Image (cartoon, helix red, strand yellow):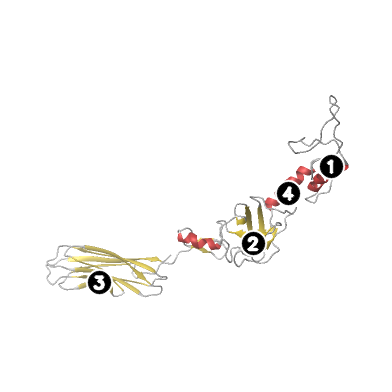
Amino acid sequence: MERFTGTGADPNANGTGLSGYRDYNSSTGTAGSIPDAAALNSIQEELCNLATATGNPLNGADNTQVVTAVQELIEARSGNYLTDTGIAGAYVVALSPAITAYAAGLTIRVKVINSNTGASTLDAGAGPEPWNRDDGAAMQAGDLPAGGIATAVWDAASTSWRLGALVPSQLGALAKLGVGAGLINDGAGNAAVGRVAQPTFAPVSAKAGYTLAPSTTYTQTVSFTPPANGWAIVLGFVNLTQELASASSVELVLNGGVIAGDQSPVPASLVEIASVSAGEACTASIEYTTGSTLSGGSNSQAVTVFFIPEQ
């Protein structure tokens, strides 16, 4: 389309340097503009092309065809997707009407045919440009799965397309921040909370009471097999009916090794954490040993274990 510059055109009719039509001025004798065929045909064809852009035929009895076509084009651009005709990593779509430049904020939905194998480009008519993640980084393999519908938004500042959603390659960074930790695929393509099963503790908590004898060790034990690498939190306590005449000792033992201990003639409670491995047969015990002299009395003691899997 162009501005009217034919017979009687006013070179500044629409502002400095913006030519257009002018009226006849009887007081000055200035002739009015004489529209020529080229000017009128230019306007006619611009409007006709717009009215028929969505496939509707011209109808002389309908004066709403242009506005209807604009609405349909907007709806088509925002609601539907375009099928990619390119190859993996180099995606191509055809807009209708075609464009020769990308405007800031231009948004396109693309049905991906071939999954990407790394950094990708998108050509929507004005040439291929980088198609990056929403954070501006290049996409990695599998970020655009075959059959998926992805949104591309033109970012004029970086001269690249931006994906309108998080992609798999970003989940590792999120996991480091604790976002999405424990999420798994439920087998149907949905995210679910994945929990590592707790081991079976035998018994759940070991406890008993004893009438004490000198220089004797009393033991309570819990056995378990961790389903994954992680940590065992072992808690134990000893409670006495009276203060003993000589020092006694309390120890927490995991798989034969002492992980915590205390020597005192008074009640004691201990807690310690230690690493354990998946499939390892584990035993955690509290061992209470009386002193060499004893003035009588009794005790009660217990041990409990909690398992925390690695994240």
Pointer 4 local density, CA inside 10 Å: few below 14, some 14–19, many at least 20:
some
* Viewer-nearest residue: 268 or 171: 171
Looking at the rendered structure, the secondary structure element under dot 3 is: strand
- Mark 2, residues whose alpha carbon is within 10 Å: few (<14), some, or many (≥20)? many
The Cα–Cα distance between marks 3 and 4, rounded to whole angstroms, is 81 Å
Task: Say the numbered circle drawn on residue 121.
Answer: 2
Indicate left or right for 52 with 180 as reference.
Answer: right
**Percent position of residue 11, x then y:** 78, 37
Q: Is residue 2 above or below residue 302?
A: above
Query: Which residue sits at x=70%, y=49%?
Result: 75
Q: Which mark is residue 73?
A: 4
* Amino acid type at image mark 3: Thr
Observer-nearest of 23 and 251: 23
Q: Secondary structure at mark 1?
A: helix
Sequence-first tag of 2 and 1: 1
Q: Determine the residue positioned at 76% across, 42% down.
A: 67
The Cα atoms of the two marked residues, 3 and 2, are separated by 68 Å
Query: In the image, which is nearer the foreground, mark 3 or mark 2?
Result: 2
Q: Can you identify the residue that label 1 sits on?
A: 39
Instruction: Point out the frontmost of discs 2 and 4.
Output: 2
Say which amino acid is labelled 4: Leu
Where residue 102 sits in the image (x, y, percent)? 67, 53
Q: Is residue 50 above or below residue 90?
A: above
Is label 1 or label 4 in front? 1
Describe the element under mark 4 as helix, strand or loop. Answer: helix
State the residue position of label 3: 219
Q: Residues within 10 Å of mark 3 (few under 14, many from 20)?
A: some
